[in-house]
Amino acid sequence: MDIALQYPFELAGTFVFAISGVLAVRDKDHDLFGAGFTGFITAIGGGSLRDMLLGSYPLVWIGDIYVFYAILAGIVVAFVFTPFLMKLRRTTFFV
């Protein structure tokens, strides 16, 4: 796959993982910070572990500010559109 095509898919995946993390704690009475932290960890967890095992430093999310922006956008979208996303949860497997 061409690198110019791969990068947007990586950002989209990070965005969706952040949404998934926020929606996972929606029933646990977490505030914005707690849900945002869970969304952040969910979005970067697997990629960070992969990079550490491969010895690839700096980690992707540290070296690229757009990954952070994708996570932040995912957290905001999850809070703003929670009712709509909950209707889609069975279709999209968010939670």
Image (tube, rainbow, N blue to C red):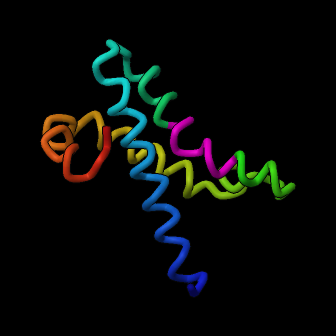
Instruction: Tell whether position 84 is magenta.
Output: no
Instruction: Tell whether position 41 is magenta.
Output: yes
Place of residue 62 in the rendered image (x, y in percent of width and height, measured from the top left): 70, 49
* Identity of the residue drawn at 50% across and 51% down: 69
Q: Which residue of the protein is positioned furthest toward the bottom in this rendering?
A: 2
Place of residue 71 in the rendered image (x, y in percent of width and height, measured from the top left): 48, 46
Q: Which residue of the protein is positioned furthest toward the top in this rendering?
A: 29
Place of residue 4 in the rendered image (x, y in percent of width and height, measured from the top left): 55, 82
Q: Is residue 36 left or right of residue 65?
A: left
Q: Is residue 74 left or right of residue 68?
A: left
Q: Is residue 94 left or right of residue 69?
A: left
* Identity of the residue drawn at 13% across and 42% down: 87
* Identity of the residue drawn at 61% across and 42% down: 45
Q: Image quadrant for the N terminus?
A: bottom right
Which image quarter: residue 72?
Answer: top left
Which image quarter: residue 22?
Answer: top left
Q: Image quadrant for the C terminus?
A: top left
* Identity of the residue drawn at 44% across and 43% down: 18
**Relative depth, front residue between 32 and 5:** 5
Query: How many numbered tags mark residues here?
Result: 0
Q: Is residue 43 above or below residue 63?
A: above
Place of residue 77 in the rendered image (x, y in percent of width and height, measured from the top left): 30, 43
- State the predominant SS element of the stretch in magenta: helix
Q: Which residues are magenta?
A: 40-48
